[in-house]
Amino acid sequence: MKKILPGIVAILILLIAVTSSCTNNLQKEERPQQLEPAVPESVGFSSERLACIDSVVNDYINRECFPGAVALIARHGRIVYHKSFGMRDPAIQDAMQPDDIFRIASMTKALTSVAVMMLYEEGHFLLDDPVSKYIPEFKKPQVLIKLNPDTTYIARPAVREITIRHLLTHTSGIGYPFIHSEIRPLYEKHGIPDGFVITDAILKNAIPALGTLPLLHDPGERYTYGLNTDVLGYFVEVISGQSFDDFLKERLFIPLGMEDACFYLPDEKADRLVPVYASNDQGFEPSDEPLYNYPFTGGKSYFSGGAGISCTILDYARFMQMMVNEGSYNGHQVLGRKTIDLMTMNQVGNLYGDGGFGLGFGLVTDGNKHQILSSVGNYSWGGYFSTTFWMDPQEDLIALFYTQMFPMYYGEIHNKFQVLTYQALIGE
């Protein structure tokens, strides 16, 4: 009997492994080519527990924290939650709709990063190539020491050149003028936009000009959130020979069925764009900031890879589903699975705090895995106007929460939405 037991145990372990493998393969085989609605229980969610999201979001709206929101959750390629709340325009009692269009701002960065990696897969460049190989103005970068009131400055040579990897990881030393106010006068003098604009600026002028300006620090030295992804948008233009707008449409939006995703909104869709509201002590008020008209007014010529896209929540969910599908969606293989593995591995060591940063995404790693309900390997980002997303490959899960507020409303509701999502996940 003692000789038989180890053999039985080995057989049982093998059967469990095979069953688990078959289950995982079955889930992949059964996953639909496009996102489809489904009963939550069919993919391991509890309808009753998902309903907690409704009560919490409605409570925030009733307390006038924000006027309205849209949320979406999908697992195994099936939508289990897609709802709108509150008002798009409270002044006229215009209810928020699930297919309303939002300015996603910095969530554009993930789209741009994927565009870059598509060209990487085609052999056009290597990640550690210097940017100056493709945009000569970035040759011999300097680091700012002092900026004078008249915008003259003192700088020293950087210890190394900026690479494509530096841009993808925000470690190049390029900043955002609205965050790093010390460089704002210099950027304004040279016509460098903060991101989304309503002028007639174009990447072909702005990005080479940016390449001649000093950096905030040596490339690779630290993480500094900045115009890196705008540079990458122009880099895509240089490599592909297309405008960045056309590249995204042809290579990403049309294949994935992202029907409303665009840099500048057509007139016929303007009534679906959610207004931006400004936070105040009492809750919110309509914003009179002219810049927030950028999706449908102005020059419509600056294709900001870091901030310029507007779309519906379902549009972005299609992009996210492609990522958790190992690069495939709607019959199109957009990226290879090993490329996505690379993009979602920590590329910056400890420069991004306890967590990690990949090629375009913030990551949950062993360093920050116990800070909120999530999974190691979760990758995410958000946008200037309070839109957020995360993808969880372990659970084959995507989730998004959209509001349209400024200053950025990244407070309790976004974190609570993540908690409320995971607490409703009860099965495989």
Image: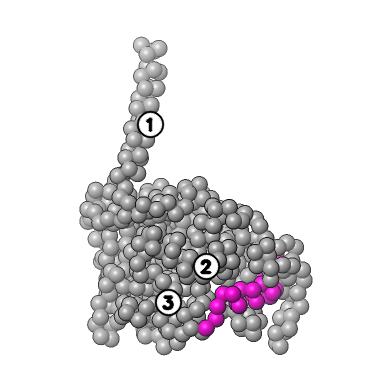
Check the image and tell me how it is coloured: one colour
**Precedes in sequence: disc 3 or disc 1:** 1
Residue at x 32% of width, y 51% of height: 33
Residue closer to the observer: 170 or 124: 124
**Precedes in sequence: disc 1 or disc 2:** 1
Q: Amino acid at mark 3?
A: Tyr
Residue at x 39% of width, y 77% of height: 265
Residue closer to the observer: 370 or 111: 111
Check contact, mark 2 vs mark 3: CB within 8 A.
Answer: no
Q: CA distance from mark 1 to mark 2?
A: 48 Å
Part of the protein shown in magenta: 200-221
- Where's residue 82, x and y in %? 28, 63
Q: Judging from the image, what secondary structure is the residue with disc 1 in?
A: helix
Vertical arrangement, residue 110 with respect to residue 396, above or below? below
Check contact, mark 3 vs mark 1: CB within 8 A.
Answer: no
In the rendered image, which residue does mark 2 sit on?
242
- Where's residue 321, x and y in %? 38, 55
Quarter the C terminus occupies: top left
Using a 10 Å C-alpha cutoff, classify the residue at mark 3 as few (fewer than 14 neighbours), some (14 to 19) or many (20 or more): many
Vertical arrangement, residue 282 with respect to residue 426, above or below? below
Q: Amino acid at mark 2?
A: Gln
Q: Judging from the image, what secondary structure is the residue with disc 3 in?
A: loop
**Precedes in sequence: disc 2 or disc 3:** 2
Q: Amino acid at mark 1?
A: Ala
Residue at x 60% of width, y 82% of height: 191
Residue mark closest to the camera, 2 vs 3: 2
Report if residue 305 is visible in the image. no
In the rendered image, which residue does mark 1 sit on?
17
In the figure, residue 27 lies in which quadrant? top left
Vertical arrangement, residue 354 with respect to residue 25, above or below? below
In the figure, residue 128 lies in which quadrant? bottom right
Picture disc at residue 264: 3
